Amino acid sequence: MLVRVTDGWTEVLRRREAGSPAGPYPVPVQHLLGEMVAAACLMQANIKFNGALILQIFGDGPVKLAVAEVQPDLALRATATVTAEVSPGASLSAMVNVNNQGKCAITLDPKDRFPGQQPYQGVVPLFGDRREKLEQLSEVLEHYMLQSEQLDTRLVLAADGEVAAGLLIQRLPMEGVGNLAGRSARQADEDEIGLNEHYNRIALLASSLKREELLTLDAQTILRRLFWEEDLRLFPAVTGEAAPHFACTCSRERVGQMIVGLGRDEVESILAERSDVEVGCEFCGLQYRFDPVDVAGLFLGHGALPPAEAGIQ
């Protein structure tokens, strides 16, 4: 699978630049977040999950958290929390894994949860089997997929200020649908790890793809350049409204629920300092304002909230 996110990715960057006092992301953070957007789109499209796929990187460097979220319709949003200076050309470990304590988490949050059902989350460290720091997001995600699915995976990712792109190569399960196929199928998949000559050939060819090629060439050119000796079957590209696009799931109702979660005492202390409670969405930049009447309605359990102004900070 190959993805090129253009308008959706530039909208993420535009909203950050317009909505944050800190201005645009440092270039290394921009590249990391763009790669996360591309990877999350590839994984969501690959598993066809009816819910949100949330990819998070967090640790002890100047980038405390980076998040990319993709919905089943490939609506996406992304943000990063930067608390200190990021040097030009900073590596993954320099940004989020200074003391080798960084983590990568992938969460699958079903759209229609059963009562009591919790989202599924898998977490892996940002180091390899010998505790060596991994410097590429692609390496981290390949390690995650090998652990969680017992399937060989090769990822090539790249991003700049205009495009977030990625190529995913994955060996198909030996039979059935992965873990649902039973113990014998899982064992067969494990036995094939690193040994399937057909996958190894394709993965080696995919690894030769350069960053500049992934960012600048169209899908058909890339596939033909990499796999010109293979029997290619190209499926129609997903375009238009069905393609990856920016959309935020924040709402006044959800922000109101969050305010109630803070507790009455905490919220009243905020109101004592200022005339309203203001909450900004880190993803899209919208500002939600609640005056004392709005807040009183929240804690009284009023279902409908009066409309209030929301704008870009």
Image: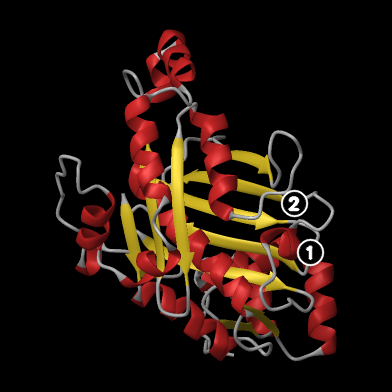
> In the image, is 276 to the left or to the right of 248?
right
Q: Which mark is residue 221?
A: none
> Where 207 sits versus 158, above or below?
above
Helix, strand, or loop for circle 1? loop
Query: Is any part of residue 168 visible from this angle?
Result: yes
Asked whether, in this view, residue 211 is left or right of residue 80, the answer is left
Q: Residue at x 79, y 90 (%)?
A: 274
Question: In this rendering, is residue 167 above or below 149?
Answer: below
The disc placed on residue 102 is: 2
Q: Secondary structure at mark 2?
A: loop
Residue at horizontal 45%, vertical 70%?
Answer: 248
Residue on which disc 1 sits: 61
Q: Observer-nearest residue: 101 or 245?
A: 101
Label 2 with label 1: CB-CB less than 8 Å: yes
- Residue drawn at x 40%, y 42% is 204
Q: Kindly identify the amino acid type of the residue bearing the numbered disc 1.
A: Gly
Dot 2 alpha-carbon crowd within 10 angstroms: few under 14, some 14 to 19, many 20 or more: many
